């Protein structure tokens, strides 16, 4: 460690449910044979063809993330984010791999599939919701019939 070394605590907010490429960035296991992607209508009891479809989506998602999306973000970051010390900044993938805590806007009970997660992932279903407000009088009367 360097003198005056201060470890970074990085907290991330993930607004999507389970997506293989995103979860792999944070150190989670990928098990496409039992964990359907949030974009698929499957459960953990997938047929062979559904598992194959889910595997294809997982592999495509990983390829797209690492070969297209993250390199484009890295290029934009290098071109536009200049500050003292930015020359020694780690690459984007290294930053994403070193997240201390990721808050995932997702409720696993919705999917109904139990799966292992890395200790730095915490599910926070409903975090984006705000308290409800009273309905207007005309809408209240319409709803009550």
Image (cartoon, helix red, strand yellow):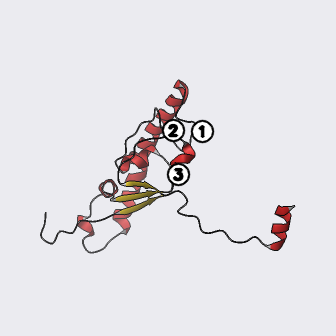
Helix, strand or loop at disc 2?
Answer: loop
In the picture, the disc for residue 36 is 2
Please determine whether, in this image, residue 112 is positioned above or below residue 55: below
Mark 3 or mark 2, which is nearer to you?
3
Helix, strand or loop at disc 3?
Answer: loop
Please determine whether, in this image, residue 99 is positioned above or below residue 32: below
Which residue is rendered at x = 50% and y = 56% of the image? 105
| Closest to the observer, 93 or 37 | 37
Q: Position of residue 92 (x, y in %)?
A: 33, 57
Label 1, label 2: how many angstroms apart (C-alpha)? 8 Å
Tally of marks: 3
Label 3 with label 2: CB-CB less than 8 Å: no
Helix, strand or loop at disc 1?
Answer: loop
Label 1 with label 2: CB-CB less than 8 Å: yes
* Residue where numbered disc 3 is placed: 107
Looking at the image, which residue sits at the far top? 48
Q: Position of residue 98 (x, y in %)?
A: 30, 56
Q: Earlier in the sequence, mark 3 or mark 2?
A: 2
In the picture, the disc for residue 72 is none
Which residue is rendered at x = 15% and y = 72% of the image? 4
Q: If the image is split into quadrants, where does the C terminus sit?
A: bottom right
Q: Residues within 10 Å of mark 2 (few under 14, many from 20)?
A: many
Q: Earlier in the sequence, mark 1 or mark 2?
A: 2
Q: Residues within 10 Å of mark 3 (few under 14, many from 20)?
A: some
Mark 3 or mark 1, which is nearer to you?
3
Q: In the figure, residue 81 lies in which quadrant?
A: bottom left
Q: Position of residue 84 (x, y in %)?
A: 26, 75
* Residue where numbered disc 1 is placed: 41
Q: Residues within 10 Å of mark 1 (few under 14, many from 20)?
A: few
């Amino acid at each position: 460690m360097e003198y005056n070394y201060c470890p970074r605590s990085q907290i991330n907010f993930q607004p999507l449910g389970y997506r293989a490429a995103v979860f792999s960035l944070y150190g989670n296991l990928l098990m496409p044979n039992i964990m359907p992607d949030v974009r698929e209508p499957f459960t953990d009891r997938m047929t062979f063809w559904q598992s194959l479809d889910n595997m294809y989506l997982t592999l495509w998602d990983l390829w797209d993330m690492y070969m297209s999306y993250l390199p484009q973000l890295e290029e934009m970051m290098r071109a536009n984010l200049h500050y003292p010390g930015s020359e020694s900044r780690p690459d984007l993938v290294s930053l994403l791999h070193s997240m201390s805590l990721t808050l995932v806007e997702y409720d696993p009970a919705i999917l109904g599939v139990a799966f292992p997660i890395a200790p730095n992932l915490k599910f926070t279903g409903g975090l984006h919701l705000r308290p409800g407000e009273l309905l207007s009088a005309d809408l209240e009367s319409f709803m009550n019939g």
